[in-house]
Image (cartoon, helix red, strand yellow):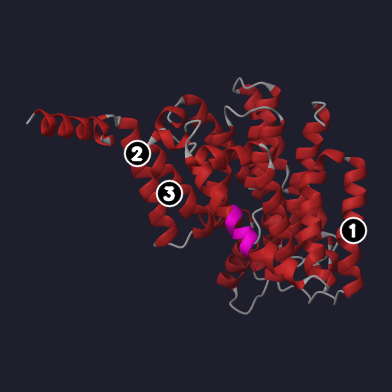
Amino acid sequence: MDYIANTISNLASQSAITTMSIGNVIMIIVACFFLYLAIAKGFEPLLLVPISFGMLLVNIYPDIMAENGLLHYFYKLDEWAILPSLIFMGVGAMTDFGPLIANPKSFWLGAAAQFGIFTAYFGAIAFGFNDRAAASISIIGGADGPTSIFLASKLGQTDILGPIAVAAYSYMSLVPVIQPPIMKLLTTKKERAIKMEQLRPVSKLEKILFPIIVTIVVSLILPTTAPLIGMLMLGNLFRECGVVRQLTETASNALMYIVVILLGTSVGATTSAEAFLNSTTLKIVCLGLVAFMFGTAAGVLLGKLMCILTHGKINPLIGSAGVSAVPMAARVSQKVGAETDPTNFLLMHAMGPNVAGVIGTAVVAGTFMAVFGIV
């Protein structure tokens, strides 16, 4: 009987129910809500499902992120900036840079969307964060999860890397919810209905030279951006050169999705109740949202100015795609434009600022690293 009693006692003491706090319950509810948004509503499920499930796991079994836990080793790949760089290679292999090459003015819209980053930087300083923490938080405004993780790890902000990564990926997933109200508020129905001229054809030679030239120019000016820009452009060169089809397929499919699984679950697993339910995390989430909203608004406003200067040839909606969420932000520009005029096709025009935003956010991250003397 003693053996049975001891066995039952041991099983009961090992149950997660006996050690679960109210905070854990709250985070489990949040994880389930995110899973609902991903599965039922289709909000970027490739990102939100692994993040949400990692959040669920760590709040039931915290030791999964302990030193010898499974997700601890996944997370080390985030800290070492390996997974963010591989994500960039996959994005490059999946993305057509043709719209940006065909319309170089898109670079200005991508640059304008970075305004949110600098707004959040000064906001974070005002909230009491040190300069390196403020830089790491502000990059959320680019809606670029890999760059957020990369910069936070390079600047030694591993203590807040989890909240930064979760905020960045959450806002990437919620682009279809956050951006449309801002876009509609800042544009008129007439502006949203503007039809843009078809982009010129881009030659294969241009597409091959573009990643090579960008890598050389950006890396010479800001060598610290080489891991991100280099991998982005390498992936795109795989795609465009036409002689490494196997590498293109691997980078854009198998490798990309393996990395998303590892990165998503490990990022989600940083959201234990103890680490996430505190004032610092709340500040980071709020600052990230403000940065993202300001970035969206800045892109649209510059789009309005360019619309005026070109006598109505540019639809301001494509400016919102200047944030780095590829290709989600470009799809939102298309969706909002089509709501005004179902025959309006803005997707390819919006891809120009969208790709420019990816490059721009990486450049801003490299600038912060150069300012703080990181090599």
Q: Main secondary structure of the magenta part?
A: helix
What is the three-letter code of the residue carrying label 2? Ile
Quadrant (top left/top right/bottom left/bottom right) for the C terminus: top right
Determine whether, in the image, residue 42 is placed left or right of residue 189: left
Query: Quarter-wise, where is residue 351 in the image?
Result: bottom right
Dot 1 falls on a residue whose secondary structure is helix
In x, y percent, where is residue 246?
73, 70
Q: Is residue 334 magenta?
A: no
Q: Earlier in the sequence, mark 1 or mark 2?
A: 2
Q: Which sits earlier in the primary sequence, circle 3 or circle 1?
A: 3
Q: Which of 101 and 156 is in front in this view?
A: 156
Q: Measured from the top left, where is residue 181 in percent x and y?
A: 54, 54
State yes or no: discs 3 and 2 in contact (Cβ < 8 Å): no
Q: Which of marks 3 and 2 is nearer the N terminus?
A: 3
Please rate how many residues cluster around mark 3, counting C-alpha atoms within 10 Å: few if below 14, some from 14 to 19, many from 20: many
> Which numbered mark, 1 or 2, is in the foreground of this view?
2
Compared with residue 117, is residue 131 higher up or lower down, i.e. above or below?
above
- Residue at mark 1 to residue at mark 2: CA–CA distance: 47 Å
Name the element at disc 3.
helix
Q: Decide which of 170, 68 is in the foreground and name it.
A: 68
Residue 257 is covered by the magenta coloring: yes
Number of other residues with Cα within 10 Å of mark 1, as a class: few under 14, some 14 to 19, many 20 or more: some
Label 2 residue SS: helix
Residue 368 at x, y percent in the picture: 78, 33
Residue 315 position by quadrant: bottom right
Q: Residue 121's image quarter? A: top right
Q: Residue at x 82, y 45 (%)?
A: 226
- Residue matched to label 2: 60
Q: What stretch is highlighted in magenta?
A: 254-259
Question: Where residue 53 is drawn, which disc sits there?
Answer: 3
Residue, disc 1: 212
